[in-house]
Image (tube, helix red, strand yellow):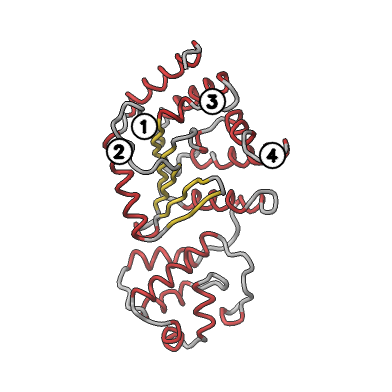
Amino acid sequence: MREDVMALRPNPTLRQRRLGSELRRMREQAGIGGSELARKLGISPAQVTQMEMAKIGVSPERLRMVASACRCANGPLIDALAEMASERGKGWWEDYRGALTIDFLEIAELEAHAKRLTFCTTAYIPGLLQTSAYASAVFARLFPPLSAGEVEARTAFRVRRQEIVRSGSTPLRTFIHEAALRMQFGGSTVLVDQLDALLNDSEHPGISVRVVPFALDTFPGSGENLTFAEGPVPELDAIEMDVSQGALFFDSQADLAMHRVIFSRLDSTALGEADSRDFIRSVMKEVKSGNV
């Protein structure tokens, strides 16, 4: 189907919206208005707006035309965007559309396309490293309460997401605050099993687990549970933040720069991998003895 007669997308995906926002960013950085870009491309201003809002797709060829019109000389970024524009088909998470809220699908989409994932958690073990029992307990404590079916669906989806880690295709680095190691979801037995699984995961060659103890003088960042997803080029990195209302996504260069500093500080202050494993074992021992 030609781009000029393409039907409007009712619900663009996270990745489609990111491509559109990058096109808008490219145009704005060039100081070109939408009407001027439309004239250069030989299309209508409405089509420029629709491309930037991801309401219609853009071919790799047209994307390169946009880059040329905007005098963008960032070859690696253009190539990465062209690759995004050429993507077809649906991800496995689309099977859950209608069964789960969009936040779940977009998080899975973000993770699936990341070149590396870095997590910072303060309240619970990162979702990609949670056991089924722990994940179910996390979902069961939500308010308003979820039905048993909803808890089961969310848990199954989280386990499915973990395949990206188990496959070893995407390196994972995680900074876990001591509070998250001690927070009990489902009771002490569930926590002990979760910590044991975390230790096993920490030995995986593609997984780095670092602990941030209470004893540290400071904790970089404001304490949110964060995901930093690295793209094929730094300009396409992204941040996801868990909040009570759902997931928030950020991709401005200012936000990316700030969170790179946060994770750099975490890297310099958190315990090393071996010391982190020793720390997790000590917490396990305390939980087993009831001294928590």
The kind of residue on which mark 2 rests is Asp
Please state which amino acid type lies under the numbered disc 4.
Answer: Leu
Q: Which residue is mark 4?
A: 146
Q: CA distance from mark 1 to mark 2?
A: 8 Å
Residue count near mark 3 (Cα–Cα under 10 Å), binned few <14, some 14–19, many ≥20:
some
Cβ–Cβ below 8 Å for labels 1 and 2? yes
Q: Residue at x 32, y 54 (%)?
A: 257
**Image x and y of residue 262, in percent:** 32, 45
> Disc 3, disc 1: CB below 8 Å?
no
- The secondary element bearing badge 3 is classed as loop
Name which of mark 4 and mark 1 comes first in the sequence: 4
Q: Residues within 10 Å of mark 4 (few under 14, many from 20)?
A: few
CA distance separating discs 3 and 1: 19 Å
Please tell me which residue is depicted at 47% across the width and 63% down the height of the picture.
Answer: 18
Amino acid tagged 3: Gln
How much space separates mark 2 and mark 4, taking CA atoms? Answer: 36 Å
How far apart are the alpha carbons under marks 4 and 1? 32 Å
Q: Which residue is mark 1?
A: 210
- Could you tell me residue 19's position as x and y percent? 47, 66
Judging by the rendered image, the residue that carries numbered circle 3 is: 184
Helix, strand or loop under label 4: loop
Q: Quadrant of residue 160?
A: top right
Q: Quadrant of residue 210?
A: top left
Q: CA distance from mark 3 to mark 2?
A: 26 Å
Residue 267 tag number: 2
